[in-house]
């Protein structure tokens, strides 16, 4: 972590502060894990008042995490959350780098009089932070929070609760330590988190062994809808609202489904299209291997973005129209896909 930025942060944290931690909409394991890890670290100094706000709710399989009961959901507590943000605060923005990723909170964040500190590992950060820790080489924001804590207070002893949160964030954002962003340093961090009390095997169980019969059946539907386009080294999955309803879909149920498409031999590009009649959008997930940049693909064609190998997007057309558009686009990328 950049020394000058750490010194600037340390100077701010020497004074009692009202601090708010915010992460992105549809918070994932890294958004929640990094926020809770940082929250517990900052709270260890009793002169600070610390709050966490997420734009909207998050999946049940993260609701066991230590201190999770302290998270305020903006969508459900708009006035309380707005008040906190408009206090004279220090706002940490975690696991995102553009206010557009905070959904309905965008206006409130943009008008806040606070100083912003960004900790994030996505590409192309916006220029809103007084202090920006932005590193696209990092496996996860949770790994960055680990380095941040060690840099801000080298004598701080990471507690079991902090270790558990950070381990969960690193685990979920690295696909259980298999994506190329997982480095030897990541593993050393994980080893230290286990030494600090993170119950690693328990965490894997809590996050991954949570299938309901309905989710397994929905996975069956998704796999049945899997289509392979060998010439484009591409695979995609669709799920209509009707199929979701028939299987009692709950938030988080489709998490990870897109990765099955990427496990097909020789496939380098996977997409999943999920109809959301309530939001009137098709929610899209893109994953890739090698140097096919799905964040650029999503940004250019599907109103989204993210990382090189994992991005999200949306379409305002019907499910069929969206898939047709996607298939038409592929021919433009044939060379890139075959060279990836
Ligand atoms: P997912 O497919 O799980 O929704 O998203 C994959 C990754 O892309 C996550 O790291 C997520 O934070 C990021 N992402 C998803 N949607 C968007 C978006 O609209 N804009 C940007 N910049 N990133 C996104
Ligand atoms: Mn992340």
Image (tube, rainbow, N blue to C red):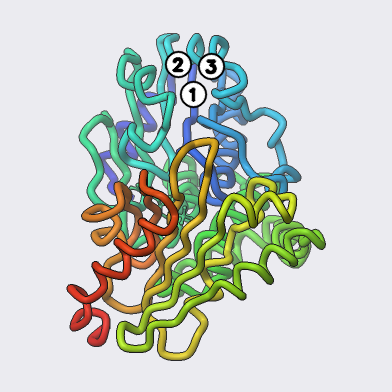
Tell me if residue 16 can be seen.
no
218 left or right of 109 in image = right
Q: Which one is earlier in the sequence, the residue at label 1 or at label 3?
A: 1
- Residue 80 image position (x, y, % from top left): 57, 11
In the image, is the residue at mark 2 within 8 Å of ligand 1 by its beta carbon? no
Disc 3 element: helix
- Residue 326 image position (x, y, % from top left): 32, 64
Residue indicated by mark 3:
81
Q: Residues within 10 Å of mark 2 (few under 14, many from 20)?
A: many
The reply to whether discs 2 and 1 touch (Cβ–Cβ < 8 Å) is: yes
Q: Which mark is residue 182?
A: none
In the image, is the residue at mark 3 within 8 Å of ligand 1 by its beta carbon? no
Q: Between residues 184 and 304, which one lies in front from this camera angle?
A: 304
Q: Residues within 10 Å of mark 1 (few under 14, many from 20)?
A: many
Q: Residue at x 67, y 28 (%)?
A: 70
- Residue 93 image position (x, y, % from top left): 41, 34
Q: Is residue 133 above or below residue 54?
A: below
Q: Residue at x 71, y 45 (%)?
A: 60
Residue indicated by mark 1:
20
46 left or right of 154 in image = right
Q: Residue at x 73, y 60 (%)?
A: 215
Q: Is residue 31 above or below residue 15?
A: below
The reply to whether discs 3 and 2 touch (Cβ–Cβ < 8 Å) is: yes
């Amino acid at each position: 972590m950049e020394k000058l930025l750490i010194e600037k942060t340390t100077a701010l944290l020497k004074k009692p502060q009202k601090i708010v931690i915010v992460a992105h909409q549809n918070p994932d394991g890294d958004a929640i894990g990094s926020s809770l890890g940082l929250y517990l670290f900052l709270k260890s100094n009793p002169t600070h008042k610390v709050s966490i706000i997420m734009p909207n709710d998050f999946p049940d399989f993260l609701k066991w995490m230590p201190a999770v009961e302290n998270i305020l959901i903006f969508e459900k507590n708009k006035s309380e959350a707005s008040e906190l943000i408009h206090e004279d605060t220090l706002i940490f923005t975690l696991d995102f780098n553009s206010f557009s990723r905070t959904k309905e909170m965008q206006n409130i964040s943009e008008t806040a009089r606070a100083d912003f500190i960004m900790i994030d590992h996505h590409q192309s950060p916006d220029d809103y932070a007084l202090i920006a820790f932005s590193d696209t080489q990092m496996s996860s924001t949770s790994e960055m929070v680990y380095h941040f804590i060690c840099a801000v207070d080298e004598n701080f002893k990471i507690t079991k609760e902090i270790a558990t949160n950070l381990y969960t964030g690193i685990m979920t954002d690295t696909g259980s330590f298999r994506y190329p962003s997982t480095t030897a340093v990541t593993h050393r961090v994980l080893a230290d988190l286990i030494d600090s009390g993170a119950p690693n095997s328990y965490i894997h169980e809590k996050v991954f062994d949570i299938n309901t019969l309905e989710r397994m059946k929905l996975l069956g539907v998704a796999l049945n809808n899997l289509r392979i386009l060998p010439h484009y080294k591409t695979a995609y999955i669709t799920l209509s609202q009707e199929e979701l309803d028939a299987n009692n879909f709950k938030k988080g149920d489709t998490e990870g489904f897109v990765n099955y498409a990427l496990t097909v031999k020789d496939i380098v590009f996977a997409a999943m299209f999920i109809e959301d009649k309530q939001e009137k959008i098709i929610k899209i997930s893109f994953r890739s291997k090698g140097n096919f940049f799905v964040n650029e693909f999503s940004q250019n064609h599907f109103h989204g973005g993210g990382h090189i190998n994992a991005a999200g997007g949306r379409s305002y057309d019907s499910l069929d129209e969206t898939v047709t558009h996607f298939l038409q686009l592929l021919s433009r990328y044939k060379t890139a896909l075959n060279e990836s």
